[in-house]
Amino acid sequence: MILSSRSFFKQSFAGARLTTVDSNGNETEKAPDTIRTLFLKVEKSQDIPVIDSVFVHGKLYKASLLPMEKEGFVGRTRFDNQPVYLKNTSRQVWFALQLVPLDVPSAYQSDKKIFVKGSVGKQPFRLAISNETELLPDVRM
């Protein structure tokens, strides 16, 4: 059983320049990438969750599941610069879902929720996450 879930996103800029120059010499703005990471908390004694599908605002994503270290730094919130940590306990553990968008049509047409479908052991689960926390953006070099 999933005990808790959290969703975070941030803007990620490729390089320090926020513009690019096309082949005609015209300068255009680079659009930042939006990076989303979901976290699921489960009992340590349970099986590792298996993720079947993730829909973010109506778009299908592939999810890679990674166990968190004892205490994981997630980032800093955009609006008040507060650090965000998720901490495992002796009985509960967090898993990070790293998402990669898939280029397929979606059956879900929600622009406000994140849907996660999977199972823990033989017990299926479905989550609807409507709250996301925005983190400070980063620049990839």
Image: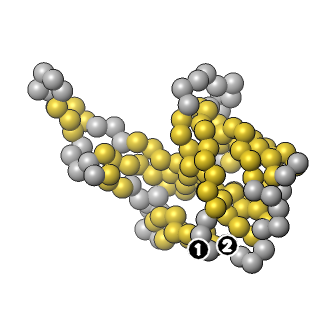
Q: Residue type at mark 1? A: Glu
Observer-nearest of 139 and 66 = 66
Q: Is residue 86 left or right of residue 42?
A: left
Q: Position of residue 34 (x, y in %)?
A: 45, 44
Residue beneath the point at 33% across and 47% down = 13
Looking at the rendered image, the quarter that the N terminus falls into is: bottom right
Q: Is residue 122 left or right of residue 117?
A: right
Q: Residue type at mark 2? A: Asn
What colouring does the structure picture have? secondary structure
Residue 28 occupies which quadrant of the picture?
top left
The crowd level at tag 1 (other Cα within 10 Å; few <14, some 14-19, many 20+) is few
Position of 55 relative to 36 (above/below): above
Tell me which label, 2 or 1, sits earlier in the chain.
1
Q: Residue furthest bottom?
A: 90
Q: Residue furthest left?
A: 25
Would you name the residue on which mark 1 appears? 71
User: Dots 2 and 1: beta carbons under 8 Å?
Assistant: yes
Observer-nearest of 99 and 58 = 99
Q: Position of residue 140 (x, y in %)?
A: 32, 52
Residue beneath the point at 11% across and 26% down = 25
Would you name the residue on which mark 2 appears? 88
Q: Position of residue 14 (x, y in %)?
A: 31, 45
Disc 2/disc 1 C-alpha distance (Å) = 6 Å
Q: Exactly how many numbered labels are in the figure?
A: 2
